[in-house]
Each structure stands twice: as C-alpha cells, then as structure tokens.
Amino acid sequence: MREASGGVPEGGVVTELEPRSFLRGLFEQAVRAADPLFAVPPFLPEPPKGRTVVVGLGKAAAVMAQAVERHWPGPLEGVVVTRDGHEAPTERIEVLSASHPVPDERSEAGAKRLLAAVEGLGPDDLVLCLVSGGGSALCALPAPGLTLADKIAVNRALLHSGASIDEMNCVRKHLSGFKGGRLAKAAAPARVVALLISDVPGDDPAVIASGPTVPDPTSFAGALALVRRYRLDLPDAVRRHLEAGAEETPKPGDPIFQRVENRLIAAPQRSLEQAASFARSQGIRPLLLGDALEGESREVGRVMAGIARSVRRHGEPCPAPCVLLSGGETTVTVRGQGRGGRNVEFLLGLAVALGGERDVWAIAGDTDGIDGAEEVAGAIVTPDTLARARAAGLDAHRMLDENDAHRFFVALGDQVVTGPTLTNVNDVRAILVL
C-alpha cells in the first residue's frame, strides 16, 4: 500500500468536484493507459530477413493487429482471434471472432488457424504474437481424445467454482493442444516475439491467456489437485485425460524457448498510475492499494468499506479527500440465481458494508468494458445507494445473497456502460472519500 508520488496540486479543485463525473473520468483514464494503439508501437521488434507472420488472441487482439499494420515497415501476414464485438478494421491481418467467456466451435477453429499459420517457418522468420486477456476461451483447442463440449463443461465448472485465474489456467493448459507454450513449440525454429497486455494479478506471462508462448511450470498433478479442491464435476474423458498425464506442456529450460521473447506492453499497475495522476490533477490525493488484489468479490468489498471508514473517522491510512485505488481480479462463487459480475458484486458488498456512510463514493469496472457476461463495465456506489434501493423496493442483502448485483444497479440507474474498450488490463476499483 503506498501513496502515489507527486502529492496533491496546490489550490486543487476539490470544492468543485462532482463525484460521479470524477469517478467516470478516472476510470476512462485508466482504460486509456492500456489502449493498444499507443501501447504496441514502442515494443515492436526489428523486421526479420524472412517472413513476418502475425498471430494473436484475446479481447485486444484486433486493435493490436491494427496498431502493428500502421507501424510495421515491411511485408507481413497473419490472423488473430478476438471476442465478438471486439473486431477492428485491418488490411493484411485477418480478424476472426469467437465466443467468450465460454468457447464455441469458432474458438477451436481459430486455434487451429493460428497453429497452421506458424507451421513450417524457418530460423530467418519472425512470429509476432499478440496476446491479451480472454485468449484462453477464444482459442480453445481440445487435447487429443477430448472434445470442445468437454472443454466447455470444464470452463463452466471453473467459472462457477471460485477458483482464481491462475488456478483456472492450470487446468485449462492441461486440456489444451494450444496453451501452455504449445504455440511457441509449433513456431520453432522461427523467432517469436510476443507482445502481452496483462489482465492477471502479478502480470505473470505464463498466466496471460494461459501462456501460449511461455514455458509452463504447472503439471497434470497440480491440475488434478485443483479439480479435487474445488470438487469440479468433470466429464469422464476429462478426468481420464488428467489422470493419464500423457503429454506434459513444455517446461522451463526447454530449447524451444531459446528464441522466444515475451514483452509486457500494458499492465494493471500502469493504468492505476494513470488514474492516480488524474486524481491529483483534480486535487484528490490518491492511495494505491495494489494491482493484484484477489479474493471473494463481496469480501473484498467489505474490507474496502473498513478502510474507507478509517479514512473518514481517523484520517488513516490517508486523510480525506482521497481516492483509494486498487486493481486485480476478484472471484465470485455463484450460489444464487441472479445476474452479476465480479465488479458489481464487489460494489454491492461494499455498499452493504458501508451502510450508507456519508461522503463515500465508489466505481469499479472491468477495463474491457464487460463485467463477466454482462454488457456493462461495472457500476457506481453513492452515499445514498441503500436508501434509494429501499425506496425502489430492492433488498440489497437478499440480492447480494442471490448474486443479483447486476439487476440491483440497473434498477438504480447506476451501471457504467462503456461498450467494448478493445483492451483489457483487469479491473479498476476506486473509492472516493470526501
């Protein structure tokens, strides 16, 4: 936990602050810091002697491809797979679409296309791999002996299990013919440069989109342990495949990675720092609580409510006016029948824990513009959220128990709708204490 450097500007504009506008502006600045059109060009490698083949996967893949085309000095070709609604116009790189968060037949076809694009290359060729969050579902090639239906069943079970993103990816890698370094293996002996936009706590390249160009330190045994821990109900073929452990993923030290370079070009911390800069420009002191906060969404909300109360009552860990900034990816263990996502569940948990605390406002949203399966980025909490909910006949506690936070904030008109942002550096949460 640290105060963002730079202090608060002399003669800030706190008295003129409109909290909703401030929070929306802060969120927009955080998203803008991860815009591929600005993030990609500084990290492009030198053109090779041979061919340049672009492959990509993830929610930002199409805009990353667009940025490559605008700035690449020589010939290139390739194909990328992105989420429905995240397409961008390109001329030389083909853009395919697939389903997210649950893969479909196009996800399997897209993974096959990417593997085919890198086959048969030589040491003078370059594979430019564009990787961003969501790639695990968008390129879902079942391992031999498994079907896409098997992978979809596992994916659904994982999404409802409460497992963290790195735990989910451990299981996914060991059911895949694409993830966990297998794309890099298919591209050898060509040089591979992967440009990564991180959406995971800690920015581990092995976890971003399940690490298609990164050696995999996890194992079949680890995947089986997670299956048992979360009591996942798996198809028989999947369980047999994990127990057999016939073909491990490429591991650290494998020679195929000697000509592979993974470059992180955008990450949650950079977006939080941009949000902090915006806050200072408005006369609000930012306090960064970390870019990798994990845990049950509602429980993280409860903890953040306690910190906000401490600010108001004791001026600790920083005096008001201030904004508490955090990132990362919380989880939701689904127990009810409602509609929601991790950001709106965090916010409803926060609102319930605050109990109408004066002068505390908050925003939380996914930087890709989609909170879970809902077409909203997140929502805003105000000091009168619970009062307005009661007036509208909404029971905040019951709706939290039912995982029904999406409907709660829609009913209040407090959802944050951005549309697809065409990037993804995980969630941004900001709690404003005045």
Image (cartoon, grey):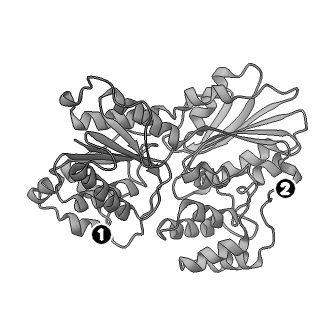
User: In this view of the protein, can residue 91 be seen by the observer?
Assistant: no
- Which residue is labeled 1 in the image? 402
| Left or right of 160 in this view: 191 | right
Q: Which element type, helix, strand or loop, lies under badge 1?
A: loop
Looking at the picture, tell me which residue is in the foreground, 11 or 273. Answer: 11
Crowding at dot 1, Cα within 10 Å, few <14 / some 14-19 / many 20+, comes out as some
Q: Which-is-in-front pick, marks 1 and 2?
A: 2
**For the C terminus, which image quadrant?**
top left
Looking at the picture, tell me which residue is in the foreground, 28 or 353. Answer: 353
- Residue 95 lies, with reference to residue 149, above or below; the image says above
Q: Earlier in the sequence, mark 1 or mark 2?
A: 2
Looking at the picture, tell me which residue is in the foreground, 217 or 232. Answer: 217
Which residue: 69% across, 51% down? 111
The location of residue 220, given as percent across then percent down, is 72, 72
- Which residue is labeled 2 in the image? 253
Crowding at dot 2, Cα within 10 Å, few <14 / some 14-19 / many 20+, comes out as few
Three-letter amino acid code at the position of disc 2: Gly
